[in-house]
Image (cartoon, grey):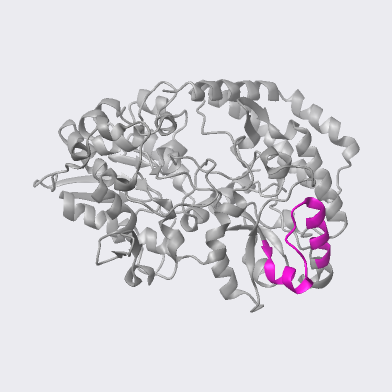
Amino acid sequence: MKKILAFLLAALMVMGLFAGCTNGGDETSATPPASSTPNDEKNDDNQDDEIPPYERNAVVLPLTTDAVGFKLWIANATAFDGFGDYYDNFFFQNMELRTGVKMDFISPSTGTENETFQLMITSQDYPDFLQGVFTYYVGGMDKAIEDEVIIRLNELAEQYMPNYNYHRTRLPEIERLSLTDTGNLWGVQHIVDRPQGAFIGLGIRQDWLDDAGLATPGTMDELENVLSVFKDNYTLDSTGPLWLPMTGFSYGSSLNGSFNVVGTMVNQGFMNKDGVATYAPLEQGYKDYLMMLADWYQKGLVYRDFTSDAPVLPNTELVTNDKIGVYDYVYTFSSMYAISAADPAYHLVALTTPRVSADQSYSDIHVRQQQFYIRSGNSMGMTTNIPDDKLEIACRYWDYPFSDDGIILGNYGVEGETFEYDENNQPQYNEFALAMGNISYTQVKYAIHNGPTYCIWSRELAVLDADQQACESIWGVAGSEWIMPEVTLTDAEGREFTSIISDINTLVSENAPRFILGQKSFDEYDAFVAQINSMNVARAVELQQNALDRFNARG
């Protein structure tokens, strides 16, 4: 289990680079609107009347003429030609030019983030800002405030951060996500203009479908037929055309989602089933999904060595050498696959998770990968090590990226240098910025890709091809309302929950693939469920329910 978790964390860091953003989710409209600047926003709550635009955007620059500097702890899993660390980031360089505030960076090496963070907290030698504190601090943000590691920002934001506070409170949903269960504003949040749809989902070889004269499969029976044709005619060495993550359940819930269940890698197996916390492995759909895959595996339709591959995305060699034909992918990856594919006809397109049966409606599917308005893992806490006489400048520094000018800087850079306005007065990256060769590299180098700013995540769509742009709407046909939000357990609850669920999820993650492989008979399934129940899973569900109730009561 520890090996699987290590693989997952490493893979998610890579996905965070290439996806629009990663971290939780929410359901969106099928067709993404054009990127817009804050002046184009409409607000049903009429908050523009309550907080006049001139108050929000009246930022006096520079913020200081004195030598003021801060230190930011930020994980840095990104390094490529032209970008070694955040000193090479165009946004922070221009923030210093505009505000007069210098930012220094502390970035742990990849794979050591959690260990480095815990040692830093233990020593109490931490910098002014901690990006990722939500992910790494044990016990939650209320405890981090109680332990005097980070500062409660409610009053400071009201006084010194009008732009941030405007965007944080413009919708009740955003405000709820920004607070702890006790109402603490714990940091500067990564807020998006609208929730991104799924950035990872199921893909299928369209060139193989076309060559075989097959229609896009819409049900599991139709997918089974397609997989049979792929196996007999297209996949190299008959390895099995359907790739599965090593646990059998995908991070994007792209196949198991039709059965309305998640794997243990998604919110540790817990779902928000219409306000009721449930543990997915106890659901009938969990067994039904495993039984279908076991049948397909016996028929040679599943990649035979799936348990030895990876937990999130397939090995690129399998993709580009025609060994698999249906698999999960991040929507910005497909062009890279095509470039390196052995077959010049390679054409990957998104596939909506097939329905279990023809009479199942997509309105009956409630599970897929999703995003929220706030990405807590990308957000940042201000620490108690900031001197009192620097607090106002610290707040105003991070307020500026939420002003209209700051939003343009954080998303596109500087007009004439990294972007131009198009005929619709919308900013678009120019050739200079796009010369990085990958849109995510462009955003990491010249903008803030994932950070405590206001993010127009769809800024990247304009430079993607039609197949990539269509992914959000194709994957978004399935619902996502049963995905558990980022609930918070208290320190005591968290320790109790972890002591229970760790052993249970180890049991589940080890045995689910065995059912698929035929190493365990489904005659043993009732005993498997009984063993889960005997391990006090009911208490773990109760703790999740308590946290979900508190989350829903926020604000």
Nearest to the observer: residue 216 or residue 177: 216
Q: Quadrant of residue 271?
A: top right
Q: Is residue 514 above or below residue 460?
A: above
Q: In the picture provided, is 455 more to the left or to the right than 59?
A: right
Measuring from the top left, give residue 493's x and y in whole percent: 54, 22
Nearest to the observer: residue 475 or residue 385: 475
Q: Is residue 282 magenta?
A: no
Q: Say which residue appears at 73% left-offset and 38% top-offset.
A: 508
Measuring from the top left, give residue 278's x and y in whole percent: 67, 28
Q: Which residues are magenta?
A: 204-229
For the question of whether residue 333 can be seen, the reply is no
Q: Is residue 223 magenta?
A: yes
Nearest to the observer: residue 318 or residue 493: 318
Q: Is residue 449 above or below residue 237?
A: above
Measuring from the top left, give residue 539's x and y in whole percent: 65, 21
Find the residue positioned furthest to the right: 523
Find the residue positioned furthest to the left: 65
Measuring from the top left, give residue 390's x and y in whole percent: 17, 36
For the question of whether residue 313 can be seen, the reply is yes
On the rendered image, what quadrant is the C terminus found in?
top left
